[in-house]
């Protein structure tokens, strides 16, 4: 066994969640190794809907423009009943504007593109994913963690301060840490999905057969990838079906009755088993979990990748701050803030999936379109409504302004003292805290790490619910830390003293 040079954080799993965390830590100067058991980067669409809040995260990380270059143009979705009649056609992912949210709709890009732009961004920080490198275990002591990795080069011990498991539902990190993964498996609900070429089908729309045994069969053209993305329910009493183009063609013929449609050249094929599970804790000592390693749920609403990316974004600044000397208790707020979100996602995706399954084709069409256009009865699938009100990191000075500590800080245009209109999200971008001051009340004392802006303009005042004086301290992850209309010289300094870096 060989010993390697030490690093600060070992990230296990190089999907969107692990890559987001690696990018966020790297831009803060944290030493990172990110390892991936697979020997080659995965291809295929998989998680293709990048929701509104995730787009905001990607903008902050500097990858959104690159990802837009891979996004599919929004096409109508055409829903059919069991007889092949069209029951509705609508552009599903083009949501109406939301005040203070620049990206209310979904960006439709294959997951392989999302991962590629994140890897490119990570490479700009001098860090590359280590393929064919498997995490097999660890030992922890008072000073750090010794992670054991295995690759074609042999076994290696890596000394680190923390390990973060972003290695999916079957997480080895979670198992080695002894963290429970509580919930249930829906044994009779399995889906065949993947990418292939379809001949003889109209490629100007996505096709969805909403009625039939086991759930919805769908085929969506992905012109930028040169394939079609499909999902198809497998028979409940099956178990030995091959994962093949022939298996999908058989399901397609049985469900649709269409002739003249042929399938070939699969890019990837997989079977998805519906699970509803989550951990009982996000952390065991110096080991933390994010994404599917911590929570899995039905796919209704497309929340998996997006919830995991937001896990990573919440954890990144906290972990970096602790590594630079902040109290380790700051890491406890990761679980405090993100576990209720995961629990809500499990509850709402389960309810949404059951609701859709119990509906006729026209009702399914209406409810799916409504879910992605902000009219879902269960929850907002955009992620824009996620908040941390009540968190130990959310401090409300008074009730005189509309925005609340723990809220997502909205975007707006304003005059920030330069005489030019600026965008608030441009002020927030980066690794710092941002202090917005409305009105003429004197600024409080602020540490050097805080960027202070005196804000003027009706749009920003409306977004933040400020009529006179207002103070809003925005965290590095874009959530409001401190808010109110009256403050003293120590208000901001006292708050940040709780998170002090030595």
Image: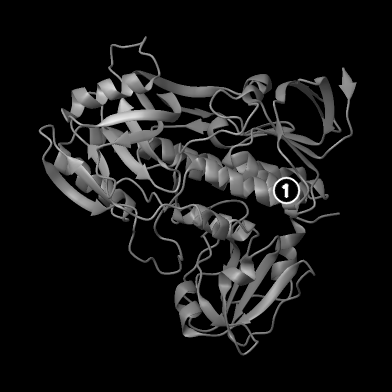
Quarter that holds the N terminus: top right
Going 64% across and 22% down the picture, which residue do you hit? 172
Instruction: Name the foreground residue: 389 vs 475.
Output: 475
Q: Is 8 left, or right, of 98 in this rendering?
A: right
Residue 212 seen in the figure: no
Quarter-wise, where is residue 95 in the image? bottom left
Residue 177 in the image, given as x and y percentages of width and height: 68, 23
Q: Which residue is mark 1?
A: 123
Instruction: Name the foreground residue: 62 vs 441.
Output: 62
Vertical placement of residue 134 versus 313, above or below: above
Instruction: Name the foreground residue: 65 vs 426.
Output: 65
Residue 216 in the image, given as x and y percentages of width and height: 26, 32
Residue 32 in the image, given as x and y percentages of width and height: 77, 41
Vertical placement of residue 302 versus 237, above or below: below
Residue 433 seen in the figure: yes
Residue 308 in the image, given as x and y percentages of width and height: 54, 41
């Amino acid at each position: 066994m060989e010993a390697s040079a030490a690093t600060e954080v070992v990230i296990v799993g190089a999907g969107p969640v692990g890559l987001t965390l690696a990018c966020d830590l790297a831009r803060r100067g944290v030493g990172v190794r990110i390892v991936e058991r697979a020997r080659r980067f995965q291809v295929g669409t998989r998680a293709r809907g990048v929701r509104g809040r995730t787009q905001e995260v990607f903008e902050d990380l500097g990858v959104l423009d690159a990802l837009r270059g891979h996004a599919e143009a929004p096409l109508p979705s055409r829903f059919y009943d069991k007889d092949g009649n069209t029951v509705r056609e609508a552009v599903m992912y083009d949501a109406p504007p939301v005040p203070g949210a620049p990206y209310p709709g979904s960006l439709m890009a294959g997951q392989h593109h999302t991962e590629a732009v994140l890897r490119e961004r990570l490479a700009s920080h001098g860090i590359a994913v280590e393929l064919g490198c498997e995490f097999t275990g660890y030992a922890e002591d008072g000073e750090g963690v010794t992670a054991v990795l295995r690759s074609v080069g042999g076994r290696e011990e890596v000394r680190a301060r923390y390990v973060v498991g972003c290695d999916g539902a079957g997480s080895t990190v979670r198992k080695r840490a002894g963290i429970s993964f509580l919930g249930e498996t829906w044994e009779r609900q399995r889906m065949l999905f993947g990418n292939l070429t379809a001949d003889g089908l109209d490629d100007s729309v996505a096709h969805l057969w909403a009625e039939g045994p086991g759930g919805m069969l769908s085929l969506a053209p992905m012109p930028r990838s040169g394939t079609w993305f499909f999902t198809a329910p497998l028979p409940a009493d099956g178990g030995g079906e091959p994962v093949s183009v022939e298996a999908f063609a058989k399901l397609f013929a049985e469900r649709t009755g269409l002739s003249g449609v042929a399938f070939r050249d699969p890019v990837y094929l997989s079977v998805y088993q519906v699970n509803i599970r989550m951990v009982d804790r996000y952390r065991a000592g110096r080991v933390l979990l994010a994404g599917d390693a911590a929570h899995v749920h039905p796919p209704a609403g497309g929340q998996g990748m997006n919830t995991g990316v937001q896990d990573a974004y919440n954890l990144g600044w906290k972990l970096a701050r602790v590594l630079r000397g902040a109290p380790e208790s700051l890491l406890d707020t990761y679980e405090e803030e993100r576990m209720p979100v995961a629990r809500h996602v499990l509850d709402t995706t389960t309810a949404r999936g059951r609701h859709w399954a119990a509906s006729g084709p026209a009702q399914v069409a209406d409810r799916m379109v409504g879910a992605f256009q902000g009219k879902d009865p269960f929850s907002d699938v955009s992620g824009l409504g996620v908040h941390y009100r009540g968190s130990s990191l959310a401090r409300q000075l008074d009730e005189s302004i509309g925005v609340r500590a723990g809220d997502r800080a909205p975007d707006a245009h304003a005059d920030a003292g330069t005489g030019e209109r600026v965008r608030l999200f441009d002020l927030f971008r980066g690794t710092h805290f941002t202090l917005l001051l409305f009105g003429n009340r004197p600024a409080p004392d602020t540490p050097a790490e805080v960027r202070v802006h005196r804000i003027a303009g009706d749009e920003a005042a409306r977004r933040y619910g400020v009529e006179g004086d207002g103070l809003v301290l925005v965290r590095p992850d874009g959530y409001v830390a401190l808010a109110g209309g009256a403050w003293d010289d120590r208000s901001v300094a006292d708050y940040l003293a709780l998170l002090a870096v030595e």
